[in-house]
């Protein structure tokens, strides 16, 4: 009950300051452990763990189909160069 009394004695401005301070500390800790751009977070288990996205990366891996059927792709193009039109 001692901690609750401390919070109730704080003004709304003090509470807002403490919350902002905690958010700033959390962002700094997160940034220092995950200094990798987000597009690389799932490249390895170590990076995913450091960035706190291990579960999301596992879900992403499950959604990729390794046994998908191959696609035959043919590209036709026409050149506007006069030499190629001869």
Image: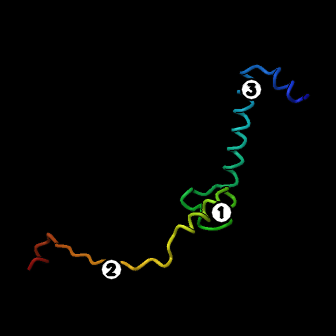
**6 displayed left or right of 11:** right
Residue in front for this viewpoint, 61 or 49:
61
Q: Earlier in the sequence, mark 1 or mark 2?
A: 1
In this rendering, the answer to whether 41 lies above or below 12 is below
Q: Which residue in the rendered view is the most extreme toward the right? A: 2
Foreground mark, 3 or 1, reads 3
Residue 57 on image: x %, y %: 60, 63
**Mark 3 crowd level (few <14, some 14–19, many ≥20, 10 Å Cα):** some
Q: Earlier in the sequence, mark 3 or mark 2?
A: 3
The image's mark for residue 72 is 2
Q: Quadrant of the N terminus?
A: top right
**42 displayed left or right of 7:** left
Residue drawn where x is 76% and y is 19% of the image: 11
Q: Earlier in the sequence, mark 3 or mark 1?
A: 3
**Mark 2 crowd level (few <14, some 14–19, many ≥20, 10 Å Cα):** few
Secondary structure at badge 2 equals loop
Mark 3 and mark 2: Cα distance apart in space: 62 Å
Residue at numbered disc 1: 47
Q: Quadrant of residue 25?
A: top right
**Mark 1 crowd level (few <14, some 14–19, many ≥20, 10 Å Cα):** some
Residue 78 on image: x %, y %: 16, 73
Residue 19 on image: x %, y %: 72, 32
Foreground mark, 1 or 2, reads 2
Residue at numbered disc 3: 15
């Amino acid at each position: 009950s001692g901690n609750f009394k401390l919070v109730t004695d704080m003004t709304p401005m003090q509470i807002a300051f403490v919350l902002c301070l905690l958010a700033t500390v959390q962002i700094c800790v997160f940034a220092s452990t995950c200094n990798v751009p987000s597009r690389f977070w799932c490249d390895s288990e170590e990076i995913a763990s450091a960035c706190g996205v291990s579960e999301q990366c596992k879900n992403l891996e499950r959604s990729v189909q390794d046994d998908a059927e191959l696609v035959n792709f043919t590209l036709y193009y026409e050149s506007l160069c006069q030499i190629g039109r001869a």
